[in-house]
Structure formats: structure tokens, C-alpha cells
Image (cartoon, grey):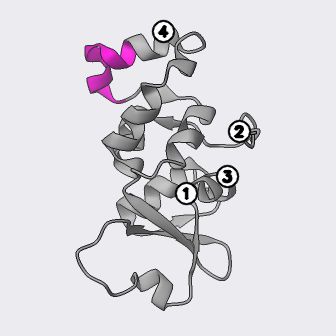
Amino acid sequence: MEKRYDVSSKEVSLHFGLALTVFGEDAVRSVLRQTKWDERYSSLLAKLESMEAKVFGISLPGEVVFEIAGRDECLYDFYADPDGIHLYAGARKREWTDPPAAEVLGDKKISAQDALLAYGAVSLFAAVDKGSGLKGEK
């Protein structure tokens, strides 16, 4: 049976455009195309298919973002530093064989889903966009 997480109390929802940046279009679209969301989020899915999606300000529910974070198509791996405060992102598909700098510096690789739950969605975006994110960043 699939493991369930309570993401309603976590800060894991993310705007559509930011989700595209953090996870990549393939990961986001592969989850949004799943029929299990059709009934619960029909108006949201309709907006995303319309021109309104170009605005990128449509917020994706936490449970959808959590599922996106678990996809193999995601663009980045995430690394937590030993103090557990800072989060870093490293490209998942790289052209070189050297380990990511975060790993060399002693940071621990964690799954995107674990990073999402522990650090929050904004921290994942900051890690991708600015090079590092902070636990609980808003």
C-alpha cells in the first residue's frame, strides 16, 4: 500500500511556475495528467490548461506538490548540510562524473519529498534559484 503523508499542515504548496522551476515540466505535467486528481481539483486543472496558466500564479495543493517531488523526472537532487538548516540543489542529470559539490562538502543527499516536508516548498525553490535555502523559509 502507498505510504500517505499529511501534507495539509506542512508548507508544501507551491505556485505552478515555481513548481516548474524546482521540479521541471516533465515531472509537473506527469502528475497533473493523472486521473486521480480530476474530480478533486477539476477547476484547478481547467485553469492550468487555459491561458491562465501562463500567469504562473496558480497555487498547487500540497499533496500534488508532494507527489511531483517523488517523480524520477525531477531536475534536481537535494542536499542538507550537517546542521540541518541549509538546503542545496544539484542537477540530477549531469554531463560530468564528479560528485556534486554539496556532497563533497559533507552534505547529505535527501529525497525531494523529504526535503519538501522538512524544509518547505519555498526553501526548495530558493535552493534551486539562489543556490541555497533555509529550513522554514517563507
The span shown in magenta is 47-56
Which numbered disc covers residue 7?
Answer: 2
Give the percent coordinates (x, y) of residue 76.
Answer: 41, 61
Which numbered disc covers residue 112?
Answer: 1
Residue kind at label 1, given as amino acid type: Ala
User: Is residue 133 rendered to the left or right of residue 82?
Assistant: left
Q: Label 3 to label 2, Cα distance in Å?
A: 8 Å
Instruction: Report the mark closest to the observer, 1 or 3.
Output: 1
Q: Earlier in the sequence, mark 4 or mark 1?
A: 4
- Disc 1 element: helix
Residue kind at label 3, given as amino acid type: Leu
Q: Label 4 to label 2, Cα distance in Å?
A: 21 Å
Which numbered disc covers residue 43?
Answer: 4
Q: How many marks?
A: 4
User: Residue 99 in magenta?
Assistant: no
At x 37%, y 33%, the residue is: 29
Q: Earlier in the sequence, mark 4 or mark 2?
A: 2
Q: Earlier in the sequence, mark 2 or mark 1?
A: 2
Residue kind at label 2, given as amino acid type: Val
Evaluate if marks 3 and 2 touch, with contact meaning CB atoms under 8 Å apart. Answer: yes
Q: Label 1 to label 3, Cα distance in Å?
A: 9 Å
Give the percent coordinates (x, y) of residue 22.
Answer: 41, 51
Give the percent coordinates (x, y) of residue 66.
Answer: 59, 42
Of residues 106 and 97, the one nearer the viewer is 97
